[in-house]
Image: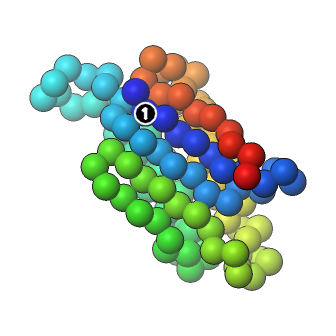
Amino acid sequence: MTKAVINRLNNGDIIGFSIRGHAGAAKNGEYDMVCAAISAVGYTALGGLEELCGVNTYKESDGNLTMNLPEDMAAEDWATAQIILKTMEIGLKQIENDYSKHIHVSIKEV
């Protein structure tokens, strides 16, 4: 199962996320569409953060993706990052709605 954790400030702003583990929706050796969908949502958010905000602060390893926003972002970039990250959260929750056996999305207030 994939576990996605959205790190949120008490004002609702998202400051980062982690996506860990493989969905396990396909048999061994087969293409896992759920895992691919989760990856597409996560990497699209990272691409948007880099292209629109100049943020490239992520780490990845086998089945794990983490990102935290830098604390010194300009206000306009921060606002854009919030739109991107909240859209990513919506996408992950939509996947969870259909494939709850393979992904769990949670919010962690930090």
Graded by Cα atoms within 10 Å as few (under 14), some (14 to 19) or many (20 or more), the crowding at tag 1 reads: many
Q: Residue furthest left?
A: 29
Residue linked to disc 1: 2
Residue at 63% x, 46% y is 6
Foreground pick, 29 / 4: 4
Residue 17: image x %, image y %? 57, 52
Q: Is residue 26 left or right of residue 76?
A: left
Q: Amino acid at mark 1?
A: Thr
Q: Is residue 110 visible?
A: yes
- Determine the residue located farthest toward the right in the rendered image: 11
Q: Tell me if I can see residue 37 in this picture.
A: no
Residue 61 placement (x, y as % from top left) = 31, 55
Q: Which quadrant holds residue 28? A: top left
Q: Is residue 110 above or below residue 31?
A: below
Q: Residue furthest front?
A: 110
- Residue 77 in which image quadrant: bottom right
Q: Residue at x 63, y 35 (%)?
A: 106
Closest to the observer, 20 or 83: 20
**Residue drawn at 61 percent across, 57 percent down:** 16
